[in-house]
Image: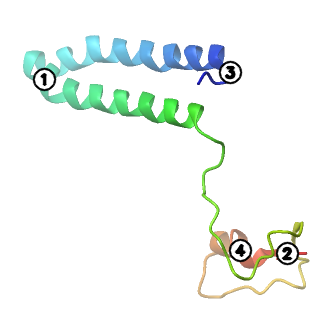
Amino acid sequence: MCPSGWAVLIATFIMIGGPSALVFIFSCHAIGGWYGTFFLGIPYLMSCANTLRILLNVALTDPGIIPKIRSSSINYNRNYAVSYREKDELKIDACKTGAANFFSLAQFKLS
């Protein structure tokens, strides 16, 4: 399966792989000689390989980060709209931080 933005994917591989290769070649050996290449380079190469693996996984799979979880309270044959609650409708939890209150699911209403 080829992603729709395959040219951008190749460019992203080059932009990640090129600097990573330069860091591996120059930094790891300069920090600790051959021991630095082994003890820093191997985990670094594993990290780069994992980054490129995740990039391919994201590029080649269906979009969406959170899988859909079935709920008995949702009618899947009906269209829903999600909107923000008005300021007077919001309930602020004093135990939470401002950011936690802002990103809380209670901020949204389903209609």
Query: For the residue carrying disc 1, how many other residues have a C-alpha within 10 Å: few (<14), some (14-19), or many (20+)?
Result: some
Q: Amino acid at mark 2?
A: Leu
Disc 4 marks which residue?
105
Disc 1 marks which residue?
38
In the image, residue 103 sits, relative to residue 18, either above or below, namely below
Between 51 and 78, the one lying in front of the other is 78
Disc 2 marks which residue?
110
- Of mark 4 and mark 3, the one earlier in the sequence is 3
Q: Residue at x 74, y 82 (%)?
A: 73
Query: For the residue carrying disc 3, how many other residues have a C-alpha within 10 Å: few (<14), some (14-19), or many (20+)?
Result: few
Q: Is residue 89 left or right of residue 26?
A: right
Q: Amino acid at mark 3?
A: Gly
Q: Residue at x 80, y 69 (%)?
A: 76
Cα separation between marks 1 and 3? 36 Å
Q: Amino acid at mark 1?
A: Phe
Cα separation between marks 1 and 4? 47 Å
Between 74 and 97, the one lying in front of the other is 74
Disc 3 marks which residue?
5
